[in-house]
Image: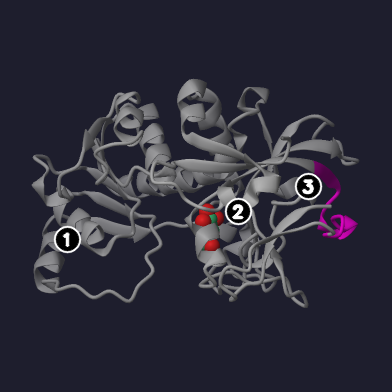
Amino acid sequence: MRAVTVTPGVPNSLQLTEDWPEPAPEEGAILVEALAVGICGTDHEIISGAYGEAPPGQDRLVLGHESLGRVVEDPTGALQPGDLVAGIVRRPDPVPCPNCAVDEWDMCRNGQYTEHGIKGLSGYARERWRVQPKFAVGLDPCLASVGMLLEPTSVVAKAWDHIERIGRRAEWKPQTVLVTGAGPIGLLAALLATQRELSVHVLDRATTGPKPDLVRSLGATYHTSKVTELDFEPDVVVECTGAPVVVLDAMFQAGPTGIVCLTGVSSGGRTIDLDAGALNRDLVLENNVVFGSVNANRRHWELAAEALSRADQGWLNSLISRRVPVEAYADAYTSGPDDIKVVLDFTA
Ligand code: BGC
């Protein structure tokens, strides 16, 4: 069968492998036919050779961690043939660490977790895949054209879950949220903020293209200024750019008792001047919290599935800039200037 593969560590080794083996029964009882995979910055990083790890004993890694498929067979009865399904990305470490031992693999403490399509496990960009019921999330049939957004939504569902848990350390009535970056993660973080009936502001440098309208049609306010030029101090910041200056500005701009959630994975290597004493003073005197958030556990995937089914389906569809047939995979993995989410379509 066909699979999109790379040799991790070798830049631009992306190819469509025609004779990839069928998924082994050990991969899971549920057999799934792929409908689509979403493509994100992590895929681009893997293709550049900077990230990613093939399964032990293999040279090539199948890409794809934003999955959507249809169940072909599930002898366990957890799902029915024809059901829409997404596969969870991360698997717990084998030790396991205290968090993985209780299925909080998103909080793995020893780094020995594996991730489909990223780290040590074949991804979902292949015509058929298998998954264990524990790592399969069923989707509402209304999500047939956008279900590959479940994975990025699970990432922001976790971010919001942790923001709210931190908020509960004291009386907390947040009103304003700033999301920095209007890519898929930023837009989905903003969607979840509007579902919480907060006043939502999204900041991005794009002045043209689809981002301003996507933000406004959520009922949120779009900004293109610097973070420090905003005329309010947000109660919550969800930082989705990973851009060093934006990250620091977000920490300075958050209001008293503010919570800053960092979700952007920066490449590193760039140094900037920082008055660390002033930042420390600001954070201490305002009881602020800055924390990082990555990945998601099953509870977050379920929260995400619920959030997506409640969302305006037209808006979700408008996040998908291009649906590219598998044959044209190279186009799918080449970013266009106005792309929000590009999807590789296995049904075309
Ligand atoms: C994925 C996460 C993953 C992270 C680090 C992100 O693109 O959405 O699930 O944990 O990359 O590999």
Q: Which residue is mark 2?
A: 330
- Indicate the amino acid at tag 3: Glu
From the viewer's perspective, tell me whether residue 50 is left or right of residue 66.
left
Q: Nearer the viewer, residue 311 or 14?
A: 14
Query: Mark 1 or mark 3, which is nearer the start of the sequence?
Result: 3
Residue under the image location 36 percent in, 33 percent down? 210
Q: Quadrant of the C terminus?
A: top right
Residue under the image location 51 percent in, 60 percent down? 44
Task: Report, in whole angstroms, how far the alpha carbon at label 2 lies from the one at label 3.
Answer: 17 Å
The kind of secondary structure element at disc 2 is helix
Q: Which residue is mark 1?
A: 283
Q: Which residue is mark 3?
A: 127
- Indicate the amino acid at tag 1: Leu
Mark whose residue sits in front, 3 or 1: 3
Q: Nearer the viewer, residue 288 or 64?
A: 64
- Tell me, yes or no, if residue 44 can be seen here: yes
Q: Position of residue 183 (x, y in %)?
A: 39, 44
- Indicate the amino acid at tag 2: Ala
Do the numbered discs 2 and 1 sit on residues whose CB atoms are within 8 Å? no
Q: Nearer the viewer, residue 68 or 233?
A: 68
The kind of secondary structure element at disc 3 is loop
Which residues lie in the magenta part? 20-32
The kind of secondary structure element at disc 1 is helix
